[in-house]
Image (tube, grey):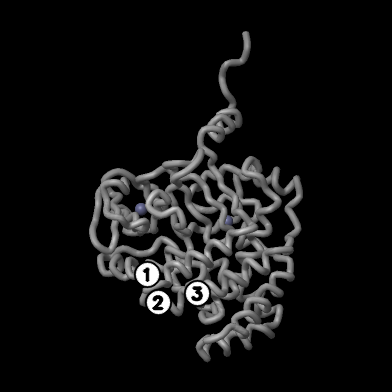
Amino acid sequence: MPQRILEPGQIETAGQRATPRVRLPARDRVFARRAARLRERAMGHPLADYLRLLATVCDAQQRALVGFSASPPSAAQIARAREHAMPPLLASGGPREPHWHDVVHDIAGLLGAADGMPAAVGDLAARLRSAPAAWLEQQADALLAARAGAIDVAAAPIVMAALQVYFVASTAAFTAADVPLLDVRTVCPLCGSAPVASIVAAQGPHAGQRFLHCALCATEWHRVRVQCTHCGAGGKDIAYRTLARRDAVDDIAVADAEAVRAETCDACHAYRKILYEERDTAVEPVADDLASLALDLLLAQDGYHRASGNPLLWQGTGG
Ligand SMILES: [Zn+2]
Ligand SMILES: [Zn+2]
């Protein structure tokens, strides 16, 4: 008799064909797209200067990423990660190759040379252009482990931006099929970091599917909709919030025109933003999260806390 029962690996493969469970970052445009979105959202925005400053940081990231290579993990490391369902590029696991320090210096150089920057940004850029290696490593360890007391708050967005370049470059070693399936679905399957927001795709094989977007390496992984991305609760505990109104259903067609909403959970009182490509094909998780900080203020007033922070804005909430 032929074997009729599918092994778990075969089920996973069949499922992938229907709904790809991972979307790896497009390294030729990941930061350029973020920069463009920040500039678009800056128009008429109360925090326009701040969003444009961060767009300059993203320009520098894209420039640094071109030609930046990180040594790939060995086949044995990838196999071990799959076997143990562990993220193969575990962010808090170190050590890192030291050439990510050059990215800090490059971003600081570009910021220092940009027109119209506030004096404080110029001072920060000067300080980071000559930041010593040991200090950068200590800051990276503190940021990736979210040890708030050890973090230089002013420098954190730039250090994190350089680490993003390093980790996006590291994902180049992977195909979607190499990415392990983790038991814990609330962290990135490649680097173990928390997601910054989620995005509901509008096109292609992903249409209608929701993906969580890694704050560090920009990998996206599938997550069912109407489920808390922090504690896993679903159903009646989940609601959707914009600046204007609160909805009980995850259906943009019946909501207002907002492409960015907050998905709140009454089981754990956490929330993350959820972005709808169907409303605006240019939505980008890091950029739209920053451009919707007014929504965070509203949710804080209502007693909800962010499930995790934005990588370009150190808020002390950690990941
Ligand atoms: Zn990641
Ligand atoms: Zn929850």
Q: Nearer the viewer, residue 214 or 117?
A: 117
For this orientation, the residue located farthest to the top is: 1
Name the residue tied to disc 1: 293
Residue drawn at point x = 56 percent, y = 29 percent: 14
Residue drawn at point x = 52 percent, y = 82 percent: 154
Q: Nearer the viewer, residue 207 or 80?
A: 207
Q: Amino acid at mark 2?
A: Leu
Look at the numbered disc 1 and say if its residue's Cβ is closer than 8 Å to ligand 2. Answer: no
Q: Amino acid at mark 1?
A: Leu
- Please provide percent x and percent y for residue 125: 60, 84
Name the residue tied to disc 2: 47
Could you tell me which secondary element the residue under label 2 belongs to?
A: loop
Q: Residue 148 bears which disc, if any?
A: 3
Q: Is residue 71 above or below residue 314?
A: above
- Please provide percent x and percent y for residue 174: 67, 48
Is label 1 in contact with label 2 (beta carbons under 8 Å)?
A: yes
Residue drawn at point x = 54 percent, y = 53 percent: 188
Could you tell me which secondary element the residue under label 1 belongs to?
A: helix
Q: Earlier in the sequence, mark 2 or mark 3?
A: 2
Q: CA distance from mark 1 to mark 3?
A: 21 Å
**Local crowd size for mark 3, using a 10 Å CA cut-off: few (<14), some (14–19), many (≥20):** some
**Local crowd size for mark 2, using a 10 Å CA cut-off: few (<14), some (14–19), many (≥20):** some
